[in-house]
């Protein structure tokens, strides 16, 4: 079964600074997708960025970028020019490309709570 | 375009009862997934429906079931409620079922089992 680990339960960053959230995963599959989701205090989860495993190029969305290291099974999220609105719980998620009737093919990490200090 | 809606937003039940939660996806979305979020276990995938068929299922007991209607609305049912079923239940919809598709989450239903 796949697992996703986020080793930093909490992190803080100064406004306008850069912060990197760590995520590692374990899988024996070669084809899969990785996501970072953000859950602000209001609880509505939103997608931050996604990466297809077969693409070597790291995904970028405005101030958000990832460092995808497939061999190391690492998928970190970098937030540049941090803003107060970035404060939230961030979840790293793995999704298998294989459809399955059994087991979880969509696995979330435990989350990292990010605080942004003014 | 309206977002994903979930009803009810809050629910209190007692052990042994059953409960049905509802999810209305974004118009045009045909895939609906359900998740359970608890402080102890985090966010866990329950199941996914696409065009009225269950496509994926997580590691939950048979007390947890779901269905999807022809208009893509989905319901999740939990029978014989246990204290451990207290959680935030999130529904997410996407246009298609392929794994890369972005999922749009609803606000959740907070279920408390007494």
Image: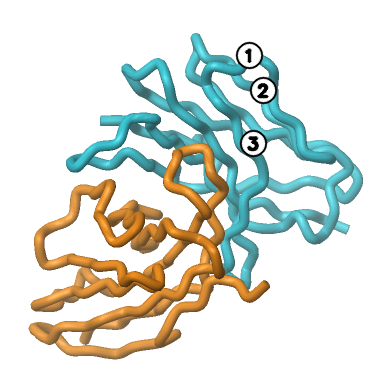
- Looking at the image, residue B54 sits to the left or right of residue B91; the answer is left
Name the one closer to the observer, A29 or A76: A29
Quick one: quadrant of the C terminus of chain B? Answer: bottom left
Q: Quadrant of residue B38?
A: bottom left
- Percent coordinates x, y for residue B17 in the rendering: 12, 86
Residue wearing tag 3: A21
Give the spatial CA distance, label 3 vs label 1.
20 Å
With respect to residue B71, does A77 lie above or below? above
Q: Which chain is cyan?
A: A
- Percent coordinates x, y for residue A3 in the rendering: 35, 33
With respect to residue A36, does B47 lie above or below? below
The way the protein has been coloured in the rendering is by chain
Name the one closer to the observer, A110 or A35: A35
With respect to residue A105, does B39 lie above or below? below
Residue in view at x 24 percent, y 49 percent: B57
Of the two numbered discs 3 and 1 in the rendering, the one whose residue sits closer to the viewer: 1
- Percent coordinates x, y for residue A53 in the rendering: 52, 21
- For disc 2, the chain is A
Residue wearing tag 1: A56
Give the spatial CA distance, label 1 vs label 2.
10 Å
Residue wearing tag 2: A67
């Amino acid at each position: 079964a796949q697992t996703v680990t986020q080793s930093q339960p909490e992190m803080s960053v100064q406004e306008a600074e850069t912060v990197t959230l760590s995520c590692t995963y374990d899988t024996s599959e070669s084809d899969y997708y990785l996501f970072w989701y953000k859950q602000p205090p209001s609880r509505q989860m939103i997608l931050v960025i996604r990466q297809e495993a077969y693409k070597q190029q790291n995904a970028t969305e405005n101030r958000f970028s990832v460092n995808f290291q497939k061999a190391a099974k690492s998928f970190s999220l970098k937030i540049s020019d941090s803003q107060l609105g970035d404060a939230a719980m961030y979840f790293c998620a793995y999704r298998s490309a294989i459809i399955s009737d059994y087991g979880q093919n969509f696995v979330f990490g435990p989350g990292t709570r990010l605080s942004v200090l003014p | 375009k309206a977002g994903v809606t979930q009803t009810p937003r809050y629910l209190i039940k007692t052990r042994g009862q059953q409960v049905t939660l509802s999810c209305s996806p974004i118009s045009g979305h045909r895939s609906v997934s359900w998740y359970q979020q608890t402080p102890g276990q985090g966010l866990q995938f329950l199941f996914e429906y696409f065009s009225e068929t269950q496509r994926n299922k997580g590691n939950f007991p048979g007390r947890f079931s779901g269905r999807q209607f022809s208009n893509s609305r989905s319901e999740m049912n939990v029978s014989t409620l246990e204290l451990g079923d207290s959680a935030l239940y999130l529904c997410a919809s996407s246009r298609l079922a392929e794994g890369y598709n972005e999922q749009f989450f609803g606000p959740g239903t907070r279920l408390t089992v007494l």
